[in-house]
Image: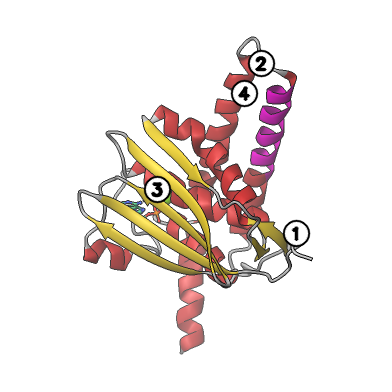
Amino acid sequence: LQDEIIKSEKIRIVSDLAASVAHEIRNPLTSVRGFIQLLGDGGLTEERRVFYQQISLAELDRAQLIISEYLSLAKPDLEKIESIDMNVETDYVSKVLQTYANFNNIELEVALDQNPIVIIGDKSKLHQALVNLGKNAVEAMPDGGKLQFKVSRDQDLCLLNITDTGTGMTKEQLNRLGTPYYSTKEKGTGLGTMVSFGIIKKMNGTIDIKSEPGTGTEYTISFPMSGQFTNEA
Ligand code: ADP
Ligand code: MG
């Protein structure tokens, strides 16, 4: 019976694939559009130009990856496992979100740790998870606000805080967060958070959420550190 339930749930999810793929590839496409616009500005340094180009290519790769990921929703395993410096990836994700934040009058603040904080996982899936959460934070601040990413270390744990000054959620809304198709948005699919939570859990991460209606939301995501410190020998 359990198998039957799982099977019908899978069919239900797969039947909505077209909508979710469209939704998820909109994120990288929006970023690439922004970067191509920036590339059109005169007076860019060569370094900037190369950076915008690289990040655009990386985002297009991500769009491609998302499509294949959704098509293999039935086997959502991590593919490329490697050492990841949370500072570097958080910085990357914040840059991906920068144009979206600017567009919505949101101040983006990034506080990184002084030392590398290395975890083990799938880099591009981590990007996907964090961009989803960051995008939700931006969308929760229709009148502008502040989005903060903070990386820190607590003993053997890598902590990432994502804080917004947005609408916040009631207890009831929090309970539904991450369940398939829960969305309060006109064009939402209610799959972004589910995908993000799935990726974080696959990377042995835990998620704690504090939210206050009218005040904002704070995610505390923690990952076990890998224990390999190239700078401590
Ligand atoms: P979608 O963004 O397509 O609606 P998600 O799964 O990403 O789907 O999010 C589900 C719902 O959770 C959103 O519609 C929104 O109501 C709520 N939500 C998610 N993140 C936040 C946040 N940072 N602040 C307030 N509400 C949020
Ligand atoms: Mg979302």
Pointer 3 with pointer 2, Cβ within 8 A: no
Pointer 4 with pointer 2, Cβ within 8 A: no
Which disc is residue 44 wearing?
A: 2
Mark 2 belongs to which amino acid?
Answer: Leu
Question: For the residues carrying marks 4 and 2, which lies nearer the camera in this image?
Answer: 2
Q: Residues within 10 Å of mark 2 (few under 14, many from 20)?
A: few
Residue at label 4?
36
Under tag 3, what secondary structure? Answer: helix
Q: Position of residue 49 (x, y in %)?
A: 70, 22
Q: Position of residue 175 (x, y in %)?
A: 29, 68
Q: Position of residue 30 (x, y in %)?
A: 53, 33
Q: Marks 4 and 3, how far apart in space?
A: 23 Å
Under tag 2, what secondary structure? Answer: loop
Mark 1 belongs to which amino acid?
Answer: Asn
Q: Is residue 20 visible?
A: no
Residue at label 1?
231
Q: Using the image as rendered, state which of residue 184 and residue 99 is in the foreground.
A: 99
Q: Residues within 10 Å of mark 4 (few under 14, many from 20)?
A: some
Could you tell me which residue is drawn at 75 percent across and 59 percent down? 231
Question: For the residues carrying marks 3 and 2, which lies nearer the camera in this image?
Answer: 2
Mark 3 belongs to which amino acid?
Answer: Asn
Quadrant in the rendering for residue 33: top right
Could you tell me which residue is drawn at 68 percent across and 24 percent down? 48
**Sequence-wise, which precedes: disc 4 or disc 1?**
4
Question: For the residues carrying marks 3 and 1, which lies nearer the camera in this image?
Answer: 1
**Sequence-wise, which precedes: disc 3 or disc 2?**
2
Q: Is 88 placed above or below 143 here?
A: below
Under tag 4, what secondary structure? Answer: helix
**Numbered range of the magenta stretch:** 47-61
Q: Marks 3 and 1, how far apart in space?
A: 35 Å
